[in-house]
Image (cartoon, grey):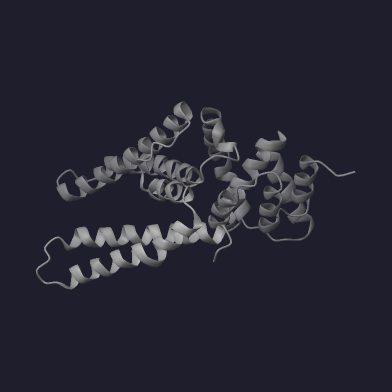
Amino acid sequence: MEIGIKEKVEQWARSGGDFSAGLSLFLTFNRNSFYVRNIEAKGVEKGLTTLVCEFANKIKLSSKEIFALIEASQLANNIVITLDDSPLQKAREKEIVQQKKTIKLREEFPFLGRKDCPEEFAILVNKMLTAYDDYRSDREKLYDLDKNKLDECYQGARSALDAYILNREIWEELNYYKIHGIILGNLPEFKGHGIKEKYNAMSTVSLGKITGNNIPRKMSYYKKQLNDKATKNKDEIRTKMADAEDELSVIKKILIERGEI
């Protein structure tokens, strides 16, 4: 008889909570490989915290209990843990606050846990949480600034304001998707989303013509303009070249998915 996910998580924790093994276990019930790569990119310390929070939400066991199982296993296996450099120690200090944020977001935006959730939101949620922490930290630093140093005051205020604006812009994207079920698309992360939808609807033959003829012709034309000393709007042309390269990259990925490359 196959054991349930709760038993698997407990076995994983009792075996020491290996980060790579945890990622593999997470993939058994959450197929969002993009999100898993995002967790992996955080490294052991932050990534382990995210994994434990996800497991806790899934099996209704507290993060504190899961960390306790991991720590007990490591101690039983004579793994030396110091308060200063232990990833577990640092992770446990942050996991309560992080878990509260994660739970709040999942309650506010239930679609984040669905398989059809746009992959861009995985990046944006992490950016939103980071922006919130940056805003609070930078706001506190404002009180320590020398009021006579106007440039430092401006930079400090600008940093706090930028973090606040980014946090609210991402919140707007999430809220719009929750209400309308479609992407608002004001943030750069969604730049390639519309392009992909456009080219996904096209036939493989049409895509082949674009990559083999249309885009190369445009790129050649743009290069000639850049090399022409009489051209004045070179920044605009460089932007067009970058857009064309993005389109080419998206089309190639679609062709790879279709088995054509």
The residue that appears at 59% across and 37% down in the rendered structure is: 113
Front one among 92 and 29: 29
Rendered-image quadrant of the C terminus: bottom right
Front one among 212 and 114: 212
- How many numbered badges does the structure rendering display? 0
Q: Position of residue 229 (x, y in %)?
A: 11, 72
- In the displayed orientation, state which residue is furthest to the right: 1
The residue that appears at 29% across and 62% down in the rendered structure is: 241
Q: Is residue 156 visible?
A: yes
When the figure is inspected, residue 226 is found, relative to residue 155, above or below; the finding is below
Image quarter of residue 250: bottom left
When the figure is inspected, residue 5 is found, relative to residue 247, above or below; the finding is above
Q: Position of residue 87 (x, y in %)?
A: 60, 55
The residue that appears at 17% across and 43% down in the rendered structure is: 147
Rendered-image quadrant of the N terminus: top right
- In the displayed orientation, state which residue is furthest to the front: 205
Q: Position of residue 254 (x, y in %)?
A: 51, 56
Image quarter of residue 183: top left
When the figure is inspected, residue 94 is found, relative to residue 180, above or below; the finding is below
Q: Is residue 149 visible?
A: no
Q: Position of residue 141 (x, y in %)?
A: 31, 43
> On the rendered structure, is 196 left or right of 153?
right
- In the displayed orientation, state which residue is furthest to the left: 230
Front one among 124 and 33: 33
Front one among 109 and 91: 109
